Amino acid sequence: MRPQRFQDFALDLAKNAPAAGVVSTLAEAGDTKHPFGLSVKLGGTEVRWQVIAELAPGDKHSVPETPVEGDPMAPIECPQISGSPSAADAELWLASLLSSSGNRELCSLELWSRRDDARPGHHGLTARFHSGAKIYVRSF
C-alpha cells in the first residue's frame, strides 16, 4: 500500500471511530512539512502521525499500484480511551483501529514502543503488507 492510499484508509477509519474527535490529514491541519499523515483528536489531545512508505520489492512509483491480498491480521485490543491519552496509548489505539479493519492487504503491525530495542519517547508503528510494502507511522 502506498502512502496516499494508506492515509485515505486510516483517515476513513479514524473518522468513523467513536473515540476520535476532529480527524484530518496533516495538510488539512496546516502541516506543510510532512506530505502524508493524520491529525486525530483523542480525548483532549491532538495526536499527529507522519506516514512514510517503503515500496514492495520491485515496485516503482511510475507504475500503478497492484494490491496484494491475503488473510487479514488478528485484531489488536485497545482499552477505552478516556482523558488525554499517553503517546503509547495513542499508538495502541491506532494499531487497534488498523488491525480491526479486516483489511486483506495488511498482514502485521509492529508497535515501536513494544520492541525489545524501544527508545523512550519513540512511538509509532510499522505496517507490513502482503505485497512486501511497509508503511512507517511516526508519532510526533
Image (cartoon, grey):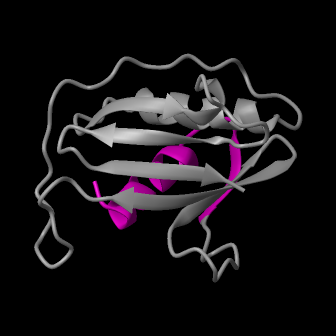
Tell me if 106 is positioned left or right of 24 in this view.
left
Q: Furthest-bottom residue in view?
A: 32
Q: Which residue is pictured at 53% across the width and 28% down the height?
A: 96
Q: Quadrant of residue 98?
A: top left
Which contiguous range is marked in magenta?
Answer: 1-24
Q: Which residue is pictured at 33% across the width and 39% down the height?
A: 128
Tell me if 13 is positioned left or right of 105 in this view.
right
Which x, y percent locates residue 92? 63, 29
Quadrant where the image shows the C terminus: bottom right
**Nearest the camera: 109 or 98?**
109
Which x, y percent locates residue 20? 68, 43
Tell me if 43 is positioned left or right of 105 in this view.
right
| Mark count | 0
Tell me if 65 is positioned left or right of 80 in this view.
left
Q: Which residue is pictured at 87% across the width and 38% down the height?
A: 84
**Nearest the camera: 51 or 122?**
122
- Asked if residue 36 is positioned above or below residue 15 in the image, the reply reads below
- Asked if residue 84 is positioned above or below residue 99 in the image, the reply reads below
Tell me, yes or no, whether the highlighted magenta stretch contains residue 33. Answer: no
Which x, y percent locates residue 35? 51, 76
- Asked if residue 109 is positioned above or below residue 131 in the image, the reply reads above
